[in-house]
Every structure is written in structure tokens, then in C-alpha cells.
Amino acid sequence: MKEYWSSLASLLGVLAFCQSLLQLVFPPQLRFLCLRFLNRVFHLFSSYCYFDITETDGLSTNELYNAVQLYLSSFVSNNGSRLSLTRALNSTATTFGLSNNDCVFDTFGGATVLWEHVVIQRQSQALTWRPLPEEKRGFTLRIKKKDKALILHSYLDYIMEKSDEIRRKNRDRLLYTNSRGGSLDSRGHPWESVPFKHPSTFDTLAMHPVKKQEIMDDLRDFADGQSFYDKTGRAWKRGYLLYGPPGTGKSSMIAAMANYLSYDIYDLELTEVHNNSELRKLLMKTSSKSIIVIEDIDCSVNLTNRKKKKNKGNNYCDPETSCGAGDEDGGNSTITLSGLLNFTDGLWSCCGTERIFVFTTNHIEKLDPALLRHGRMDMHIYMSHCSYPALQILLKNYLEYEETGSDCDDLKQLAEVVDKAEMTPADISEILIKNRRHKQKALSELLEAMKTRAERKLKCGSLRQQEMEDEEEEKRALESPEGGSESDFEQSCKKQGVIEEKMK
């Protein structure tokens, strides 16, 4: 036993002597150079290359690190075995992330990459004015050398775009309005904002499914059409005109569009804008991926059809093209129709990308034709009275109504009278909300209201038709060569009196 311990001590002594000799022959600097050389040789014959993406770049935050973290969260929940969960401020969704020193594979353009989340404990640091985190975090990207050109350009740009989309969907959307009198907020912006919480979606919107799908496809083509707009040389924007009777869901359509595309909404109040210059400044302060709305444009400003008038002198200012809240009372508003047209389809409308302009009106015939042409308002959407397919959506929303055998008679009666009644979704919704706890009562009251409305429409329509026929008969009598007999004229007046008595 004593011999064993003596042999072990001798061996340890020899190893210590060799280590001392090795340090003398190969100093630390030489050993470092050797390791560096071996590492280069290894990478020279390896088919992979590695890139480190640290959380911080000096004293500033590395945006690429945050982008990679958000991008991996979009699919890592299906691949990772151990994940970290986070939820940012003003966020509506939970974000998944890789745990310490975990890895996940991804594919792009046929190339396979490996992401590894590297977390290293930071060594004790001296006292500084800005202490660093205790852990040093980053991502290591492993790719094949042949895919280097593809990954370092297209793939990283794709990650940045995808992360922006995820960030926009997760955060609360905002509803903006221009400040009263053009005043600025504390940050120097002319827009004031509140969180946008409108629950309207295309699933709950009362509209014919075919027409609804057409609008959704057009919105999706627009949102995904950057390359198309760049190729054709067009500004990346689109205009929608929503018109129809009040209560047909124009505001709900705007909310559904914003929720479908995850866009912010800028509600522009033209009566608070003083001149064209201020209008341009408001446009410049809007963000991309947003919807700019002017509701009831025929009521807020004077944009009726221009009439031809004789020129008086050398007056180069057409008063009919000016508009605003103070025009009729001699106010100072100098917004012109030309300024509004340039706002939607001029050079200034191109100082931003991926924006949608939406105008709403109850009377499309009052608008100037220059506002309606394609390029300004590309898609005209008529918000009509409630049809039977739209009625089915309302019944499902408010009453959780499903077609069953016992309800077929009610549905048949509603289907027969809904088009004749010409009721708006708002009118029908009010009846359904009032009786939402009693489904049968709601259906009975709705059917009775539709029948009453249809009878009134039919009566007014027949009276109007009789009135038009009498007017046409009187016109033919007056235009005849004989001028018409006095008895015919008296008979026409009597018919007119009968119609007026019925209308009373």
C-alpha cells in the first residue's frame, strides 16, 4: 500500500514538472495562437459557418436580437420542448421563446438553419454608470456555407418584416383623431389617440357572404401586394367609398377592415382643418399600415357637384371648390377640393406606404365626380338594406339562431318579406337586442315589423306610381297639337287631389 502511494506521488510530480516545462516552452500567447489556428483549420474543412447575434451592441439594444426572438416565437411553440413565456406591456398575446441554450431548426428558400439561444453568466463587472445584465444573451445562427448569400440578405430581411407584423398584431390598435384647431400634443404630434377596441369583424358583419368575401380578398391582395405596386410603379395605397342609407353598417365595415388587417385608424375631422397645408401635415404624420377615414364627407364639408357659372372678370379662384366648416359664415377655412384630391391621389399621398383611404356618405349623388373616379376611390361599396343572407348572420349573432326543422316556417316568412321591407341592419339589430332572451318573441316581433314596413312601402310605391302616370298623362296632353281639352285637364286635377287625399 505504501508503495502505491509513493508511485502515485512520483507520477504527480512528473506531471507537474511536465506542465511547468510545457508552460516554459509554450507560453499562453503561443497556445492561444495554436488554438486559433486549429479552429480556423476546422472551419476551413467544415461545411457550416456561424453568426452571433447578441442582445446588446455596446450600450445600445440590438434590434435584430428582438426581431429574431419575436420571429422564433411564431413557430417555436410547436417545435421546442422547453420554452419561456413573456408578455410585453400593451400586448394582447403571450410570446413563446427558447429557453437557455436550447435550439430549434428553421427552413427558408430550401435552406435549413439552426438557431441556438446562448446564455452565459457575465463576469463580475466594475462599477459603471450603466450596469449590464448579469447574463449575456444572444442567438447563434448556424448555416451551410453555400446558403450564406441567401441567408444574410433575404432571410434576415424576412425576419425583420415578420417580427414587425407579429408586433403589430400583438399590440393594441389605436384610433386617432386630429387635434382641435390643429394644436399639437406633448410630443409635437397633431393626432390624439385612444385604444381601438371595436369588436366588429367580417364574421359578425351583416352583409351578403359573396360580397363580403370579395372585399376581404381585395384587402388581402392589397396588404400582400408590395411587389406588385413596386413593379407597376403605383403608390401603395387604395381607396374605398362606402355609401348607402344610414344604419347599413358603414362604420362597422371600417372597424372590420382594421381588425382584419391589424391596421390603426386615423379619423380625419375636416371641419377642424384650416387649410391645405395643414391637411398635408396631417397626412405626413400618419403611419404606414393604417386606414385614413373621412366619415359623412357630404355633411362635413361642401363637396357637392360643381356647377358651371359664367366667369366674372379675371377671378382665378373658384369659390365652389373651397370647403370647410366656416365657408358659409365667412370663416377662415381655405381647404379646397383640389387640396383634398391631392391628399388622396397626389404627390403628397405617396409619403407613406400601405395606407387605405375610406370615405363614407349617405348621398353619393352629392359628391363631386372628381372624388369618385378610380385611383382615388378604387372600390365603391354599396351598403344596402338587409338581405336574407345578412339577416341570417344577425340572427346567429344576437340569438345564436340555427336553422332547425321547427324554425323553417319562421325562416320562410322572413325570407319572403325581408327584401320588400327594406329594413337596415341597425333597425333589425335593435329588435333582436331588445328580445335577445326570448328567441320566439324576437322572431315574431321582427316578422310583424317587416310586414308592416313592407305594406307601407307597397302603399307608398303604388301612390307614387299613380302620381307619375298622371304627371306623364298631363304632360302628353299639354304637348299635344290640340293642347288638350279642358275636361281632360280638370279630370287630371281631380285625380291629383284624390292622390293627395290618400297620402294624408
Image (cartoon, rainbow, N blue to C red):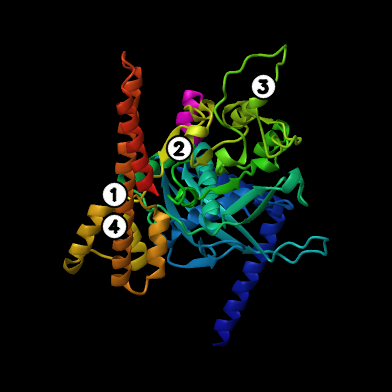
Q: Position of residue 192 (x, y in %)?
A: 68, 51
The residue that disc 1 covers is: 420
Q: Position of residue 12 (x, y in %)?
A: 62, 73
Residue 164 higher or lower than 430, as above or below: above
In the image, the segment drawn in magenta is 225-239
The residue that disc 2 covers is: 222
* Residue 390 seen in the current view: no
Q: Nearer the viewer, residue 415 or 145?
A: 415
Amino acid type indicated by mark 4: Lys
**Alpha carbons under labels 4 and 2: distance apart:** 42 Å
Q: Nearer the viewer, residue 463 or 307?
A: 463
State the residue at coordinates (42%, 49%): 248
Residue 286 higher or lower than 319, as above or below: below
Q: Are marks 1 and 2 in contact (CB under 8 Å)?
A: no
Q: Position of residue 137 (x, y in %)?
A: 62, 59
Q: Nearer the viewer, mark 4 or mark 2?
A: 4
Amino acid type indicated by mark 1: Lys
Q: Nearer the viewer, mark 3 or mark 4?
A: 4
Q: Nearer the viewer, mark 1 or mark 3?
A: 1
The mark that comes first in sequence, 4 or 2, is: 2
- Disc 1 secondary structure class: helix
Q: Which mark is residue 318?
A: 3
Amino acid type indicated by mark 3: Asp
The residue that disc 4 covers is: 451
The mark that comes first in sequence, 2 or 3, is: 2
